[in-house]
Amino acid sequence: MPITAIIFFSLKHGASNQVAQALKKIPEITKIMSVTGDYDLIAEAQVEQMEQLHDIFVNKIDVLEGIENTTTAVVLKELLQKS
């Protein structure tokens, strides 16, 4: 069963497009959303093992320019999904 993580991004001013384009190149990222509020972007990632999530951060996300901070929530259980 895949592991889903929701990643909240706080970005430097003007970095949204650059970061979103870089995130699109990461195969494990399944959704990218521009949002209002405390964060600038939210992304959904799906992996098979927690080690993969770690690798994505170390090798693909943490190295991106324009990211000030991330917060990640691992989905424990999906309660409802409407199409």
Image (cartoon, grey):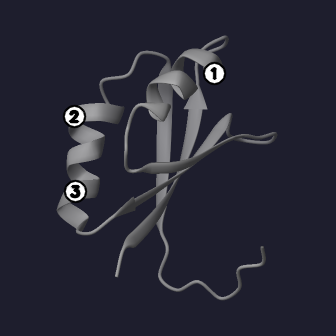
Name, please, the residue furthest toward the front.
83
Q: Which residue is mark 1?
A: 16
Calculate the distance from the C-alpha at mark 2 to the C-alpha at mark 1.
20 Å
Q: How many residues crowd mark 1 within 10 Å: few (<14), some (14–19), many (20+)?
A: some
Location of residue 9 in the rendering, given as x and y in whole percent from the top left corner = 56, 38
- The answer to whether 7 appears left or right of 16 in the picture is left
Calculate the distance from the C-alpha at mark 1 to the C-alpha at mark 3.
25 Å
Taking depth in this image into account, of 81 and 12 the one nearest to the observer is: 81
Q: Residue at x 66, y 13 (%)?
A: 13
Taking depth in this image into account, of 13 and 5 the one nearest to the observer is: 5
Location of residue 81 in the rendering, given as x and y in whole percent from the top left corner = 71, 80
Q: Residue at x 48, y 25 (%)?
A: 67
Quarter in which the N terminus is drawn = bottom left
Say above or below: 19 vs 73: above
Q: Determine the secondary structure under disc 1.
A: helix
Q: Residue at x 68, y 34 (%)?
A: 40
> Hey, what amino acid is under mark 2?
Asn
Question: Which disc number belongs to residue 52?
Answer: 3
Question: Which disc number belongs to residue 59?
Answer: 2
Q: Determine the secondary structure under disc 2.
A: helix
